[in-house]
Image (tube, coloured by chain):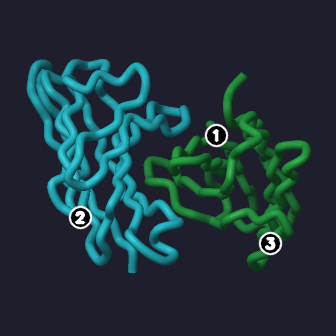
Chain colours: A green, B cyan
């Protein structure tokens, strides 16, 4: 089993749609969780951290369920510019960071 | 703030050549830098963790004699791919973690270096 698993997609959605991504992790001792965005042939960029209480940043909402060991990202009112690969990132002790393989999103006009 | 640069951004070289990639934190000091490799349509794979002034810690399966890492200062780490072969062609990305505050909690990524070995 991979340490961090994501549905690779691709998710093809129209503009304005709401889309949700899930990610599961295997190490129950993991401490920090993030969503990164990676555009084609570019480096990953931090989208948002994920907190146990859930957090929202504009159209983006991230949630963490420690009991079930999964993280989610919800994007509301999708824009064309949201098209990218979304990486689930889990960090354990010693700052060891594991990246998921990513979920590809295509937002269509 | 928290900008990381990499140089060069593109490298095309012949098989057997050694290639050096630089990773710099431009506006903060980085105690720890990470080197990743990403093949097309695959996730980032951590190659090694580099701490300033000490030897790098390599992930399982990564040859330390093949991928030489030097972290001589708090703002510079280098990765040298020795005797590169076509299978080393990949996207190499570094990231840096700062010494304090929010920069200590976040990894800031460089723009990556595309290596093509012919």
Callout 2: chain = B
Can marks 3 and 2 be said to lie on one chain? no
Instruction: Return the x and y of residue A18 as percentages of the image width and height.
Output: 88, 62
Instruction: Give the distance between the C-alpha atoms of the residues marked 3 and 2, in whole angstroms.
Output: 33 Å
Q: What element carries label 3?
A: strand
Instruction: Return the x and y of residue A102 as percentages of the image width and height.
Output: 65, 42
Residue drawn 70% across the image and 51% down it: A106
Q: B36 and B17: which one is in front?
A: B36
- Contact check, label 3 and label 2, Cβ < 8 Å: no
Structural crowding at the residue carrying mark 2, measured as other residues with C-alpha within 10 Å and reported as few (<14), some (14–19) or many (≥20) = many
Q: In this view, does B40 lie above or below A97?
A: above
Closer to viewer: mark 3 or mark 2: 2
Q: In which quarter of the image is residue B3?
A: bottom left
Q: Name the residue under label 3.
A: A55
Q: Name the residue under label 1.
A: A100
Instruction: Return the x and y of residue A23 as percentages of the image width and height.
Output: 77, 43
Residue B74, labelled with which disc?
2
């Amino acid at each position: 089993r991979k340490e961090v698993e994501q549905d690779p997609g691709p998710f093809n959605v129209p503009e304005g749609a709401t889309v949700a991504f899930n990610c599961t992790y295997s190490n129950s001792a993991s401490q920090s969780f993030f969503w990164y965005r990676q555009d084609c042939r570019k480096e990953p960029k931090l989208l948002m951290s994920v907190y146990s209480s859930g957090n929202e940043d504009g159209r983006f909402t991230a949630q963490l369920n420690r009991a079930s060991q999964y993280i989610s990202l919800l994007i509301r009112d999708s824009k064309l510019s949201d098209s990218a690969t979304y990486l689930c990132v889990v960090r354990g002790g010693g700052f060891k960071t594991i990246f998921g393989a990513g979920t590809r999103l295509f937002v269509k006009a | 703030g928290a900008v990381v640069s990499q140089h060069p951004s593109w490298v095309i070289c012949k098989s057997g050549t050694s290639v050096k990639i630089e990773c710099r934190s431009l506006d903060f000091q980085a105690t720890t830098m990470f080197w990743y490799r990403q093949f097309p349509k695959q996730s980032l794979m951590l190659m090694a963790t580099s701490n300033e002034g000490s030897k790098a810690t390599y992930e399982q399966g990564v040859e330390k004699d093949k991928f030489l890492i030097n972290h001589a200062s708090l703002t510079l780490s280098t990765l040298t791919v020795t005797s590169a072969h076509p299978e080393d062609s990949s996207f190499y990305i570094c990231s840096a973690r700062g010494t304090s505050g929010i920069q200590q909690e976040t990894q800031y990524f460089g723009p990556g270096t595309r290596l093509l070995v012919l």
